[in-house]
Amino acid sequence: MLKATGLKYRYQYGNTIQFPEIEIERGQRLLISGFSGCGKTTLLSLIAGTLKLQDGDITFDKHEYSKMSSILLDKFRADHIGYIFQTLNLIPFLSVSENIALGIKFSSTRKSKVNDLSQEVVRLITSLGLEEEILNTPIDHLSVGQQQRAAVARALLGMPDLILADEPTSALDNDTTKKFLREVMNTFDPSHQAIIMVSHDLSIASYFDTVIDFNKHNA
Amino acid sequence: MLSLLLKSIRSRIIPTSLVTISLMASMVLLLSIERIQQGAEEGFNQSISGVDAIIGPRSSSLELVLYTVFHIGRPTNNITTKTIDDIRQRNDIDWIVPIALGDSHKDFRVVATESNYFEHIKYANNKSLTLSKGKVFSDLSEVVLGADVAEKLNYIVGSKIQITHGSTESTSNKHDDFLFEVSGILNKTGTPIDQAVFLDLKGYELLHLGWKSGRKVFSLDKIDLSTIPKEDLNPKTLTAAFVGLKSKLTLFNFTKSIREYPNEAISAVIPGIALSELWSIVGLVDKGFQLLSWIIIAISLIAMITLIIASLENRKHEMTIYRANGASPRFLSGMVVYEALFIGLVAIFGAIILVSIVTYFATSQLNSTLGISPAFKWISFGEVKVFSIILLAGVLSSLIPAIMVFRKNLHQTLN
C-alpha cells in the first residue's frame, strides 16, 4: 500500500536524517520508536504529506508524493489518511461531534463511506470508551484523555486507508495508555486499514506487528 | 462554511467587535466629514431662499450678493426709489422688498427694509423667518434683531438702542438724537440674518434727515417729529431690492430686461447662481474638506488592513487544522473573505445608521450653532463608491493570512 524509499531530511539549522525504507500493507500495524528528536514526527509528517519531501519518494497506492503539489497532497491526505496529531489540533469553539465530523468534511471519498454521520460518530466514540452525552459539549470542556479519543474518532471517521498517530499516549498514564490502545486497535479495521504509530515508549510494542526502532537504526 | 464562520467569529467576539467598532469609527468620521462638507455648501447656498432675483446698482453679481446677503463690503452706488417703484409695477413681479444698507449698531449691520421682508425672505430650504420674542416692527422707531445680536448684546424686547452712521463704531458718527426700541427678536437661522438689525425704511430715512454728505448738519432733538410730512420719510435712494416673480419661467427674461433698464444703470442677479459662483471662489475650504476626506479614507484603509491581518493572524492555527483535514484553498480564502466582508459590512451599515440617526436628531442643533443643515439621507453614490473601495481593499488584504497558511509547511503549525 505505502512505500517510502531513500527518504532524507535536512533541518534548517541542524543535521540531516536518513530514514530507513518503510513498506506497509493493509492490516499491518507499525510502531516507530526512538528517543526524542530522532526524527519520528518528521517521518510521519512526510508520510502524511504535511512536510515537503526533499530527497527520496513515497508511493501510496501508486500515487507518487514527489509528483503532487501541496494542494493535491492536502486532498489526498483528506481522502486516504487519518492523522492523530501529538498536539491533538482540535478546534476549541466546536463541539465534540463537530470536531469529529471535520474528519470527512472536506473528503467526498470518506463521506461516501459514512451512511449516517451521527450514528457513525456515536459508534466510534462509544467504541473508544466515551459517553454519547459528551457529543454536544465544547471540546475544551473535556479532559485530555477524552480529547485524545475525540481526535482519534476524527482520524478514524470515514474509514481512511492509513491511520497515522503521533505519540497519542504521551499524556496518558500506563493503565489509561493500555486501555486507550486496546480501544484504538478494536476500532481499527485490519481488512481495509493500516496504522503507523510513533512513540518513544517501547512498552506498547505488543500491540503492533512490526516495530522500527530508530535508536538502533541511527546507531 | 457559514456556520463554521459564525461559530469562529462568536469564539472571538471581543477582538472581532473591537475591530468592527474601530472600523466603524473611521467610517463615521468619514461620513460626518462628507455630510458636514455638503451641509456647509448647502447652508452657504441657502443663505437666502425664496428670492428669485436681487436688483442693485450695476456692478459684479458677486459684489451685489456679498453686501445684500452677507452684509460684507458696501455698495458703490445706490438706486433710486423711483426705479424700484417702476419695477414694482411690472406684471411679472409677485413681490418686491427694498433694502437700504450703510448703518450699523455695535458692529452689527443695519438693514432698513419694509415689514414684508419677514414674510418673503426665507432661508435654508424655504424656511420662513420666525420671531422668538415680540413682533415685527410696525412703527418707524422699532427694530427687529437677529438672534446673534440679541444674544451677544443681551437685548430683550423693549431695549433701547442707538444706530451708528456707517459701519464703524465711533462717537462722532452716532445717530444719538434718536432711540429705537426692540420690538422683536428673530429665531436663529444660521445665516447672516442672525447678525443684522432690521428697521423700517422710514425710520432709516428719518435718521438721515439731519445728515448731508456723511456728516450731521442738524440734530433731530430740536425738531418735533410729528410735524415732519410722511412723504418726506419716503427714502429717495435704496441699496437693493429682493424680488419674487409670479413664475420662475420668466426669470431670465426679467434679469435681461432689468439689465437693459433705460433710466438707470442697474442689474439683477439670481442668488442661487451667484452663491454657487461665490462658493467656487471660497471653495478652498471645500478642497480642504475633500483632502481631509481622502486622508481619512487612507487611514481607514490602513486601519482596516492592519486590523484584519492582525485578527486573522490569530486564526492561522484554526485554518491550518482545516487544511490538515483537506480544506481547499477556496474554502480557506472563502472563510477569510467572508469574515472581512462581514466585518466591513457591519461597520459600514453601523456607521450609516449611526450617522443618519445623529444627522436626524442633531440637524436643528447644528443649524442653530453652526448654520450647517446636513440633509438627512442614508447614503450617496459617492459614499457607496468609497465604501466599495474600502471593502475591496479589506477583502484583498484578508487574503494575505490565507496565503500565508498555504505557503507555510503544515508540519510547523500542527506539531
Image (cartoon, helix red, strand yellow):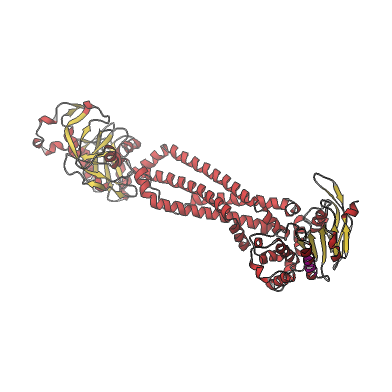
Q: Quadrant of residue B280?
A: top left
Closest to the observer, A111 or B297: A111
The residue depicted at 57 percent of the width and 46 percent of the height is: B303
Please provide percent x and percent y for residue B161.
Answer: 21, 36
Please provide percent x and percent y for residue B74.
Answer: 29, 32
**Horizontal side of residue B415 vs B216, given as left or right:** right
The answer to whether B357 is drawn above or below residue A25 in the figure is above
**Horizontal side of residue B300 vs A212, given as left or right:** left
Q: Quadrant of residue A202?
A: bottom right
Residue A80 visible, this angle:
no
The answer to whether B120 is drawn above or below residue A97 in the figure is above
Query: Principal SS element in the magenta part?
Result: helix
Report if residue A186 lies within the magenta region. no
Q: How many marks?
A: 0
Closest to the observer, B11 or B356: B11
Residue A183 visible, this angle:
yes
**Horizontal side of residue A68 vs B182, given as left or right:** right
Closest to the observer, B126 or B143: B143
Please provide percent x and percent y for residue B396.
Answer: 62, 50
Magenta stretch in the rendered image: A179-185
**Horizontal side of residue B157 vs A192, given as left or right:** left
The residue depicted at 23 percent of the width and 30 percent of the height is: B165
The answer to whether B321 is drawn above or below residue B177 in the figure is below
* Placement of the N terminus of chain A among the 4 image quadrants: bottom right
